Amino acid sequence: MVIVWRYALRLGALVAGVAGAVLTLAAPAQAAFATEMSGLPARFTAGGQVRTISAVVSQTDRRGGCAKVRWSMVLRVQGIRLDQVKMDRVEESGDFPLEIRTDGDVARLTDRQLDPGTLCPGRTVTARYRVAFAEDVTQGRVTLAAEAYDANLRLLARQSATRSVVGAGAGPTRTPTPTPSATAAEPSDPPSEPAPESAPAEEPVADQSVDAAPPAAGRPVSQAGGFGIVQAAFLLGGLLLSLGVGLLLRLRHLTRATAEAEDPPVDRLWERQAPADRWRPARR
């Protein structure tokens, strides 16, 4: 009976160890990477003015290895049309080839090739984009979401920002100051200059969810809020623990049944079985 309990305890420890290892290995990869966007103006001005923005991904886990990166930029417009926006991906060697997909007011621009750089601990990978708006844009808003994927199209990190777009003539107009004539009396006070235009408040850069298709067809990408590897690991761990508890209860039941079969009850210890009758009736 002691041997049975030893095996039961070993089995329970094995199940618990396997469950812990699965939960440890299933830590989300998004926690080891971060993406930042730079070069964003307070607001975009239409009319051929080209802005260059950058997206930088870094690896916060110093114990991780190196990985290649594929960038995907999600563009969402409000109050303007997608054909009024021009965006290019540029590198030091020139334009970078993109795969463009549109759905309503959302467009996704995904790199056809992996980024030339390599993401390592202490080393970042940067993507640069040129953005311009058509002259006929009067007012609107644009949301840019930079997403970094690895070579297996696993989402590493995402960062997004929203900015307003104004027309080229949206600034305040200055009224010309009339020149006083020679006969006119000089004014007692100098003409007041118009108040300087206050800079618009910069909108904070924050993580936002952008509803768009994954960067490549037929290749699922894990999204936040879905049934991912962490949920699957918890489910597997729960199943393993339930299996271990069930096996322990089964072994306990078997050991009790074995003990009752080997040891008779206390009230029957003094009973003796009747000896077999050695006298048999003679045949006639």
Image (spheres, helix red, strand yellow):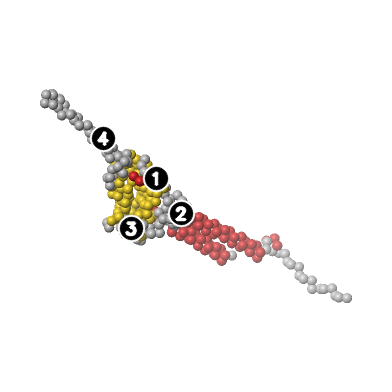
Nearer-N-terminus badge (1/4): 1
Q: Identify whether 59 is placed above or below 262.
A: above
Q: Position of residue 38 (x, y in %)?
A: 30, 49
Mark 3, secondary structure of its residue: loop
Q: Identify whether 141 is placed above or below 27.
A: above
| Residue, disc 1 | 105
| Residue, disc 2 | 228
Q: Which of marks 1 and 3 is in front?
A: 1
* Residue 162 makes an appearance in the image: no
Amino acid identity at mark 3: Asp
Q: Which of 24 and 131 is in front in this view?
A: 131
Q: Is residue 15 left or right of residue 200?
A: right
The residues tagged by marks 1 and 4 sit, at their Cα atoms, a distance apart of 30 Å
Q: Where is residue 137 in the image (x, y as percent from the top left)?
A: 32, 41
The residues tagged by marks 4 and 2 sit, at their Cα atoms, a distance apart of 52 Å
Q: Are marks 3 and 4 in contact (CB under 8 Å)?
A: no
Question: Quadrant of residue 198 in the image?
Answer: top left
Q: Are marks 1 and 4 in contact (CB under 8 Å)?
A: no
| Residue, disc 3 | 115
| Residue, disc 4 | 172
- Where is the C terminus found, in terms of image quarters? bottom right
Q: Are marks 4 and 2 in contact (CB under 8 Å)?
A: no
The residues tagged by marks 1 and 2 sit, at their Cα atoms, a distance apart of 28 Å
